[in-house]
Image (cartoon, rainbow, N blue to C red):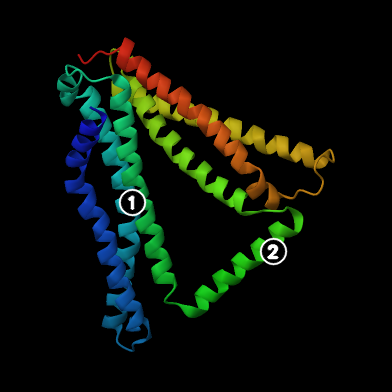
């Protein structure tokens, strides 16, 4: 049943999200051609304006596609679970855990596709500028030397940083689902209540992040781990905090979503 739910989610989303993400590829190619043909070195004002328009369209496409993808996934989750489609979904012999997992997996897939295309596009465009690319590589080399000078950052730290980033993405997706679900507890103004829960949870998370930074500063000032610097802490130890905290968030958000679906479901 989980596979069928994921297949259904894919069918319900690909007709909009796939062309949108492919649009990034198209605008990237136009931006690449504009740079390669040296539009901005032309003496014609019309050519320069055309190049400017193409580059602006390229940058806007990255921003708009990312935002629209998130909005669509949130809207899709709300409509299919608590909207009109929810009446049919919750009458099916489907376990609530399968519903949540299918939503999270497909949302994560689309977000990863979107993020991958955006980063790949930026790297592709930047790589055409040799001097700019050399400056970036020099900056990365300097940062790597600085980090390794004060903290032994190895491949494991880098790998776990990516793992923590992935868990953070899952936590964000689950947070949207939890806020939508918690908003259903209100008899009126369900959407407004969902926004209230989102900003309330976001505020609490920011407080925890601030307390973590204060804790690190106290450690440094007290002489604990004096070899550590902000550079090494940001790579060598923050992944552990991010991973643990977001795993806790994942469990809390997942349980909140499941609880509303299982115990407090009200589609009226």
Give the image location of residue 151, x and y in percent.
Answer: 73, 52
Q: Residue at x 59, y 31 (%)?
A: 207
Q: Quadrant of residue 141?
A: bottom right
- Res. 113 mark: 1
2 or 183: nearer the eye? 2
Classify mark 1: residues with Cα within 10 Å, few (<14), some (14-19) or many (20+). Answer: some
Q: Against 236, is 36 above or below?
A: below
Q: Is residue 246 left or right of residue 81?
A: right
Q: How many marks?
A: 2
Q: Position of residue 170 (x, y in %)?
A: 42, 36
Q: Residue at x 22, y 41 (%)?
A: 10
Q: Which residue is mark 2?
A: 145
Residue at image x 55%, y 49%?
159
Q: Is residue 245 left or right of residue 225?
A: left
Res 181 quadrant in image: top left
Q: Quadrant of the C terminus?
A: top left
Q: Is residue 53 visible?
A: no
Quadrant that contains the N terminus: top left
Tell me the element at label 1.
Answer: helix
Q: Is residue 79 visible?
A: yes
Going 53% across and 42% down the picture, which residue do you hit? 164
């Amino acid at each position: 049943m989980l596979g069928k739910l994921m297949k259904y989610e894919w069918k319900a989303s690909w007709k909009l999200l796939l062309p949108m993400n492919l649009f990034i590829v198209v605008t990237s190619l136009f931006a690449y051609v504009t740079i390669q043909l040296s539009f901005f070195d032309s003496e014609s004002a019309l050519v320069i304006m055309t190049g400017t328009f193409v580059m602006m369209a390229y940058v806007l496409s990255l921003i708009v596609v990312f935002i629209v993808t998130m909005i669509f996934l949130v809207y899709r989750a709300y409509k299919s679970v608590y909207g009109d489609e929810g009446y049919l979904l919750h009458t099916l012999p489907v376990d609530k855990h399968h519903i949540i997992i299918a939503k999270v997996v497909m949302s994560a897939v689309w977000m990863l596709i979107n993020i991958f295309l955006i980063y790949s596009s930026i790297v592709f465009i930047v790589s055409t500028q040799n001097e700019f690319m050399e400056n970036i590589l020099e900056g990365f080399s300097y940062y790597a030397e600085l980090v390794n000078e004060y903290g032994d950052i190895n491949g494991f730290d880098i790998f776990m940083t990516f793992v923590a980033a992935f868990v953070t993405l899952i936590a964000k997706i689950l947070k949207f689902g939890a806020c939508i679900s918690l908003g259903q507890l209100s008899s009126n103004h369900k959407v407004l209540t969902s926004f209230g829960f989102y900003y309330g949870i976001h505020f609490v998370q920011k407080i925890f992040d601030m307390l973590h930074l204060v804790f690190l500063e106290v450690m440094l000032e007290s002489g604990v781990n004096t070899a550590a610097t902000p550079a090494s802490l940001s790579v060598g130890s923050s992944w552990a905090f991010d991973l643990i905290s977001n795993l806790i968030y994942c469990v809390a958000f997942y349980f909140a979503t499941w609880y509303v679906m299982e115990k407090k479901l009200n589609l009226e």
